[in-house]
Image (cartoon, rainbow, N blue to C red):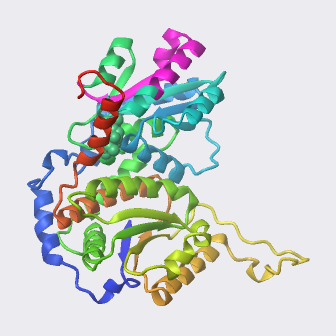
Amino acid sequence: MIKVNLDHSSLKTVELDNNKVKQIHEIIKTKSGAGNDFLGWIEWPEAFNKNEYDQMKKVANSLRSKIDILVTIGIGGSYLGIRAADEMIRGLNHSDKIKIIYSGHTMSSTYVAQLSEYLKGKKFGICVISKSGTTTEPGIAFRTLEKQLIEQSGIEKAKELIVAITDGSRGALKTLANKKGYLTFTIPNDIGGRFSVLTPVGIFPLLVAGINTDNIFKGAIKAKNNLVQNDLTNQAYKYAAARNALYNQGYKAEALVTYELQMQYINEWWKQLFGESEGKEGKGLFPTSMVFSTDLHSMGQWVQEGPRKVVFETIIKIQNPVGNLSVELDQDNYDGLNFLAGKSFHEINSVAIEGVIDAHVNAGKMPNIILEFEKMDDEQFGYLVYFFELAVAMSGYMMGINPFDQPGVEVYKQNMFKLLGKPGIK
Ligand code: PA5
């Protein structure tokens, strides 16, 4: 579950636009708005292909017995959700035998060379992901690592260790995989990259990582069934309407703030979801993010005393931590911290959250939207994905743009092709 709390924002006394929410709810429900051919994510948590899911489970299990490392190759929507889920659910120092390493999201020759060096002699597999099948970054990363895998394990064995996730019938990656005999799973046509983490894009690598994806779907279904109201009692709409009201008051940016280090990539995934969906036609809140306490010691100063009415904060508050250690009593007490002995880390973190909210909102005049999350696990991940996807649909339509395309991203992709001399591109 996610609960939206506006008690700490200047919106406490401002009326949110319930009528507009109701109108847009109808547009979403009847699929009659701009970009309506990309609304497949609405039914997906229940409508996904069960046969393909069973097959993914089998392939993932078999892959788990053959490798120690899964390299996922992809960028944007074909990368961020996997990392967000893996880090939130398994944590940063998990003990599962499979490690996921990411590639295809950078063309840094240093990164690619170091990764290639690291993989030498190791048992690794590749999951290459591209909806279009033509994106340059994952394309060239795959060429390099595919060659290395073939050299290390032989061409026949490599076929068992490479899986491609792409369009069901079109694109260069689909053709390549068919020709070379690599197994493929399908990204549905009606789900855009940044909405695709619950499709094979995210589900297959997460299965290889040993994550309980049934629970991810359970959480997404719960969200789908909970977030059905046509008004501001719908928490996803309440969040969308609140950020929209602040945008209309002149705020330019929203910072998503987490106090959980392993949710840093939730922030990154959220930035793509909101940035690519809303930044159009000269409109849109600039999505940025911070991880506290880390950033309290860098950005905290700016947040407290920098220019006002530029950025507001949206704080993720976790009710129940996965583990909860307490501070030990120390006989010597040289550090003077015995006053904290017996208190749990979560208790101290929660006090920090309250103290920071008070400082930022009351002294700093910075609106804070609070999103209360139950916990940090597979089910909550599924829930939050659906929550934010529904929120961005509402929020984008409230701003009057099509939240489901990304014409700006295409411009740079085409420019790169032109400058690098891709045949047929002028
Ligand atoms: O949201 C989007 O569609 C893009 O940002 C894509 O996720 C990104 O460009 C990767 O595209 P593809 O999966 O086609 O390689």
Please name the residue shown 62% across and 71% down the image. Answer: 297
Front residue of 140/353: it is: 140
Magenta-colored stretch includes residue 150: yes
Please name the residue shown 33% across and 60% down the image. Answer: 388
The x and y percentages for residue 337 are 79, 79
Please name the residue shown 50% across and 10% down the image. Answer: 155
What is the tally of numbered marks visible in this picture?
Answer: 0
Residues shaded magenta: 141-170
- Image region (quadrant) for ligand 1: top left
Q: Is residue 193 visible?
A: no
Q: Is residue 315 visible?
A: yes
Front residue of 419/397: it is: 419
Q: Quadrant of residue 171?
A: top left
Magenta segment's dominant SS is: helix
- In this rendering, is residue 394 above or below 73? below
- In this rendering, is residue 341 above or below 292? below
